[in-house]
Amino acid sequence: MQSQPSARYYDWWQRQDLCYQDGKLMFAGHPVSALAARYGSPAFVYSMARVKANLQRLHSALEAAGFAGRYSILYAMKANRFAPLLTHLKTLGLCGIDACSPQEVELAVSCGFKPAQISFTAGSLSKNDFDILSRFDGLVMDCDSIHAIKTWGKYRPGAAIGIRINPALGVSRENNSALQYAGSVTTKFGIYREQFHEALAIAKAAGLTVNKIHFHTGCGYLTPQLEQWDRVIASCQWFLDQCPDLRVVNVGGGLGVPHTAEDGTLDLTQWGEILRKHFGNRKIQLEVEPGEYVLKDAGLLLLGKTYLEKKQNTWFLGLDAGFNIAPEPAYYKLPFQPLSLELGNGTFSQLQVVGNINEALDVWFQDAWLPAMDNQDYLALINAGAYSSSMASNHCMRGAFREYLID
Amino acid sequence: MQSQPSARYYDWWQRQDLCYQDGKLMFAGHPVSALAARYGSPAFVYSMARVKANLQRLHSALEAAGFAGRYSILYAMKANRFAPLLTHLKTLGLCGIDACSPQEVELAVSCGFKPAQISFTAGSLSKNDFDILSRFDGLVMDCDSIHAIKTWGKYRPGAAIGIRINPALGVSRENNSALQYAGSVTTKFGIYREQFHEALAIAKAAGLTVNKIHFHTGCGYLTPQLEQWDRVIASCQWFLDQCPDLRVVNVGGGLGVPHTAEDGTLDLTQWGEILRKHFGNRKIQLEVEPGEYVLKDAGLLLLGKTYLEKKQNTWFLGLDAGFNIAPEPAYYKLPFQPLSLELGNGTFSQLQVVGNINEALDVWFQDAWLPAMDNQDYLALINAGAYSSSMASNHCMRGAFREYLID
């Protein structure tokens, strides 16, 4: 069989806590076969140690860039809201929370976070949403429209707020328009330069102090996109200069992790230097809101093999769950690479890995390179820690799964 | 304002039970404003009368095509599994059920359908799936792989089965590869010609009688695709000829409804004639499995207005729910056109209608033509009866919605 593609398939993602040892896939110090034997399938397994390492790497980068004592990391809980995870994060004390719905705020508070540790950014809020949000004293509100400024001013006259702005310039990996938050096309996100002075005037009239600027301009960016990101941040400076009471700048999330052998990791040193260049001399508190970066590579999805069969000239490996429990590959074409739990004798072949949903987009991975699967019962999909269980549906009533946190 | 596009926007979908009367949007005999006042938002409202009319139209077409007394309609419950709807369908007696997971079979039986009224077609079945399915005596099993034939043969030696085949030719609307079930690329669905004789031999060895051929080769087809559909059915005849015990042919679902002014309705007379041409002289029972055709245009999604605001030069209308409760527009680029509950004074403007999820693909409709929305509190999205609530997720904890059936 061809061995070159399989080598690339197995090279890029291995790391100390996720690798083959003596031919067995290991994760977070456990043979994955032992995890599968204990938890069954479908099951998401998250490594708290990896989550912690990801957060510490971000802390180090921000400190190295000169932000020691004047930055916060706010975990974007929409990536994964598994309650034990949130509770552990609270105990760990390495991050606050970025929430995007009143229900997320309620859950974060139930898991131990104080409202003042939660930054709220969302659009299209209803009266009911504002009612709930106003019950949390100290919650940090980022208004993403003039409507939100007006409304919050009625609930909280005299409060300090953030404004989410839209620099009309975004960061995106090529060919993925579904991930464009800001750019040449006008989106619903934030307040644009054209309306910004009006927004400030309305905030002032409502007695609100605008002490924070928030922007989130892309998703899943890696090192090649940092040049774009630099330009985006440069284009935000104008907004900052309009705010005499500015105290906090939130640069959003969007920090990505590699999904394929072609992707490299995000260069955090270069990332930190861009932040230093733009904010090093400003007297501000810096906020970052990573979701994918903290959780995605800390999660494995364990799925059971259902069948292995040739159709025409293609081999199919069936699994016991479909795209509905981890829809990112279907929505965003971001593949979750499957791995066998045992490496076998080093012979690999190409298989299409599919799920159990009667829908054409229910393909887990087009070209998996796997060893002989005849005697293997499970498969592990990497990068399933974020935007998977949190987006799961019960489509075809195939929504059942388990979640486990390994500490 | 431009009136031409707004006329097209309002022309194509109006029908007796969904139309403006004296400037008020009516659905199933009720002013939609009264439904919104009663049910709030977000709420799915389904019209049982429309469901019944859709089923009766199919019955008429099949009878006109000469299949009286030798056909069945099996509703594809994956489109919408709201239990009151299933119970009403059972009472109505116009259809059986097409189920695609053991959990769907259990629910259909709980709603009153007998296992013999349920046709089961799905792939990638686990041992646990087969265990559950084998508990339902009389359930009609369509095997979609050689693996399924072998396994079912162990559970039910001597049984009659269907085989889902794949003619390697499909029906699809242009530019929507996400909806391709069969075609030049090999998919996971069904058994191809290359493996079909092996499949028959294995069935025979397991003591199974293959008395049914099933195929499902596309999704949402309309009149322009009927020519393709004709060729697809022609290409399936070879499979039928290989089965000496053939009694039933199931031509799947895929019958579409229009989503835009450019789409026409599906010409059921032409559709029936194609079936007559291919199956009129065969001594078989014909089965059809519509999902979208039965439910989609029988459902409205009522959403509350959150804000109306200009960003750059684009007007945005925000709603109190996002793509996660009705993901078809996001997955498949099939738009759900929004309508105001009151027509106003006849002046329309173009708005982008968006949801409350912090994600770039959370756009309900790019170019809606709506009257002044300042004094309107709700919006209705048409075509929300199928593949909406059944695929909903709790992403961002924004998964709450209500469902109501109007009888």
Image (tube, coloured by chain):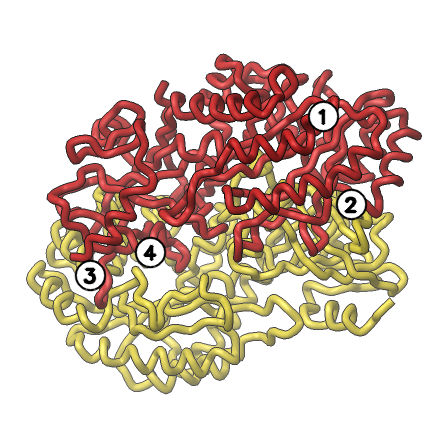
Chain colours: A yellow, B red
Residue tagged 1: B281
Q: Earlier in the sequence, mark 4 or mark 1?
A: 1
- Residue type at the position of mark 1: Asn
Tell me the chain of label 3. Answer: B
Q: Chain of mark 2?
A: B
Answer with mark 1 or mark 3, whichever residue precedes in sequence: 1
Give the amino acid type for the residue marked by disc 4 in the picture: Gln
Percent across and percent down for residue B382 are 35, 39
- Which numbered disc, 4 or 2, marks the residue closer to the eye? 2
In what quadrant of the picture does the C terminus of chain B appear?
A: top left
Q: Label 2 is placed on what type of residue?
A: Tyr
**Residue at (82, 50) in percent of width and height:** A310
Out of A72 and A355, give the one closest to the viewer.
Answer: A355
The quarter of the displayed image where residue A328 is located: bottom right
Q: Are there few (<14), some (14-19), or many (20+) residues within 10 Å of tag 4?
A: some
Q: Is residue B47 left or right of residue A138?
A: right
